[in-house]
Amino acid sequence: MFALRQSLVGYRFYQTLISEVDQELEVKMRELPRAASGSEQMPPRTKARIYQRASNEPAFDLKAELFRIAGVDLTDVPGIRAFLLLL
């Protein structure tokens, strides 16, 4: 039980740190300028979503922010997901 309790405390600690990183990432991404060219509205999706949302994806709409910054939907490329573009 001790090891399980320690693991739970560690898990909650790291979830808090991840949440803080998400908040900082959102603030920094909103500071980036909008693309000079590109649509205001995201185009309809052309690829099927075949995956579940991962628990480690940011809490904010990263895909929309990337579209605003790049002016195109980079995640419409097969094999590309929004959080992979941050690596």
Image (spheres, grey):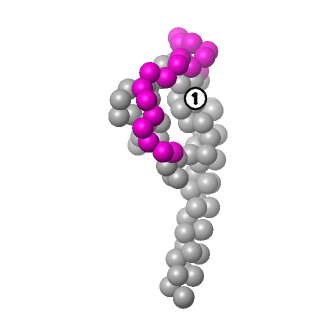
Residue 49 position by quadrant: top left
Q: Residues within 10 Å of mark 1 (few under 14, many from 20)?
A: some
- Residue 30, position in %: x, y? 63, 32
- Residue 35, position in %: x, y? 54, 18
- Residue 54, position in %: x, y? 49, 49
45 drawn magenta? yes
Residue sitting at x 55%, y 69% = 11
Q: Secondary structure at mark 1?
A: helix
Q: Is residue 86 visible?
A: no
- Which stretch appears magenta? 34-53
37 drawn magenta? yes
Left or right of 46? Residue 68 is right
Residue sitting at x 52%, y 77% = 7
Residue sitting at x 44%, y 42% = 51
Q: Is residue 19 visible?
A: yes
Residue 84 position by quadrant: top left
Q: Where 83 sits versus 32, above or below?
A: below
Residue highlighted by disc 1: 64
Q: Where 21 sits versus 4, above or below?
A: above
Badge 1 amino acid: Ala
Q: Where 68 sits versus 80, above or below?
A: above
Nearer to the camera, 51 or 4? 51
Residue sitting at x 42%, y 38% = 50
